[in-house]
Image (cartoon, helix red, strand yellow):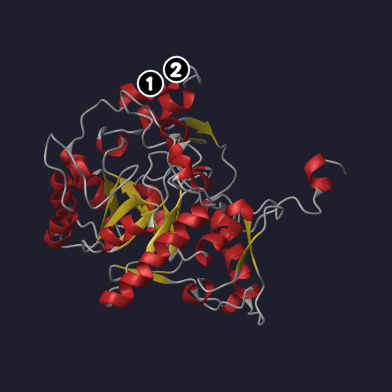
Amino acid sequence: MAEMESGTRKELRRAYGFDEVALVPGNVTINPVDIDLSWRIGGCEFAIPVLASAMDAVVNPDFAVRFGRFGGLAVLNLEGLQTRYENPEEPLAEIAQSSPAEVTSLIQRVYQQPIRPALIGERIRSIKQAGVIAAVACTPQNAPEFAPLAVEAGAELFVVASTVTTARHISAGKQELSFEKFCSSMEVPVLVGNCVSYSAARELMQTGIAGLLVGVGPGAACTSREVLGVGVPQVTATIDCAAARDDHFRETGRYVPIITDGGMRTGGDISKAIAAGADAVMLGSPFAQSAEAPGRGYHWGMATPHPGLPRGTRIRVEINGSLQQILFGPTSRTDGTQNLMGALRTSMGVCGAANIKEMQQAEMVIAPAIVTEGKIWQLTGRK
């Protein structure tokens, strides 16, 4: 009671996800065909502001090539099945065929196979030989070892990612990765993730990173929010990290793009992420549904193989179309999960935004009834 009377009790602030906000149409509308979706990071320019997640059910070299030719950037996981097995199709098939009761144990087992450094170079070279930009990812503990191999093989962007990443890490054990030293020693731009707060984002940007992934636990196959109890809804997380980016730019003149990573299912979600301040988005499960993805209609979280505390699960996403349909249509689906770029262009046109920078200035309102207002016939399934 004395503590409460002293005014020291903890206060909570409201945070918002995609289904709780809406975009306000602009005073001017623009023809969708005149919208510029391009963006830049680390000296590389892309036609669409979309990355494919470094997850084994989403990206293999063939997918990376196809996605790159569509104007996006697919990130290859250097700690996944592609670098553990000469023929990764075999463990991928096992995971797809396993029963729900046994699949997590199976995933833990197949990921015990050691990573083979020779395969890192082989996979990257196969992407580069096709003429698209090669981006790869690994966790902080393996970055010093894998980065030189990746750069030598031709990787042009290097992602260091973990469930939660900060510029400062306290450990009584082995010395942790210094992003400042790592970035200064790298010949290619370094992207880092994941982060959800203003202060952590500012500190990471000060280390010299070229881009920041935003999001803790929002992915469809991730269970970190349930297992660990951590995370911030993606709209609020993006707004906070975008504020850090803008303040960092004002102070240093160096612009660090932010990428909203996970939690998006539709073109509307992508539009809201960019309006919240994102320069681009990273998607996993939407692309796991493509015929070109290696997951065979399944998707699983990156931390699912963890031997002691799995923070991901295998989900069935089905194969719902081609990568072409998912990105650009045509489609007969009415739920916004296909022709994502068409939806983004139309949303930007309605908001009067001719490019990504202008879309970041679009007005957004809190609207918890945005997905239910007037939709009783859809929600009840009546015809």
**Above or below, 245 relative to 229:** below
> Which residue position is annotated with label 1?
106
Q: Is residue 326 left or right of residue 293?
A: right
Q: Where is residue 358 in the image (x, y as percent from the top left)?
A: 51, 77
User: Where 349 falls versus 158 (above or below)?
Assistant: below
> How many other residues sit within 10 Å of disc 1, few (<14), some (14-19) or many (≥20)?
some
Mark 1–mark 2 Cα distance, whole angstroms, equals 6 Å
Q: In this view, does 22 lie to the left or right of 225?
A: right
Which residue is rendered at x = 44% and y = 22% of the image? 103
Q: Can residue 218 be seen in this view?
A: no
**Dot 1 lies on which element?**
helix
Res. 91 in view: yes
Q: 338 or 8: which is nearer to us?
A: 8
Q: What residue type is labelled 2?
A: Glu
Res. 102 mark: 2
Residue at image position (52%, 44%) is 291
Left or right placement of residue 15 versus residue 41 in this view:
right
Taking the image as shown, residue 41 lies to the left or right of residue 140, namely: right
Q: Where is residue 136 in the image (x, y as percent from the top left)?
A: 28, 51
* Amino acid type for the residue under numbered disc 1: Leu
157 in relation to 32, above or below: above
The residue nearer to you, when weighing 321 against 249, is 249
Q: Quadrant of the C terminus?
A: top right
SS class, disc 2 = loop
Residue sticking out furthest to the top: 101
Percent of width and height locating residue 86? 26, 34
Location of residue 284 in the rendering, given as x and y in whole percent from the top left corner: 46, 46
Check if mark 1's residue and mark 2's residue have beta carbons within 8 Å: yes
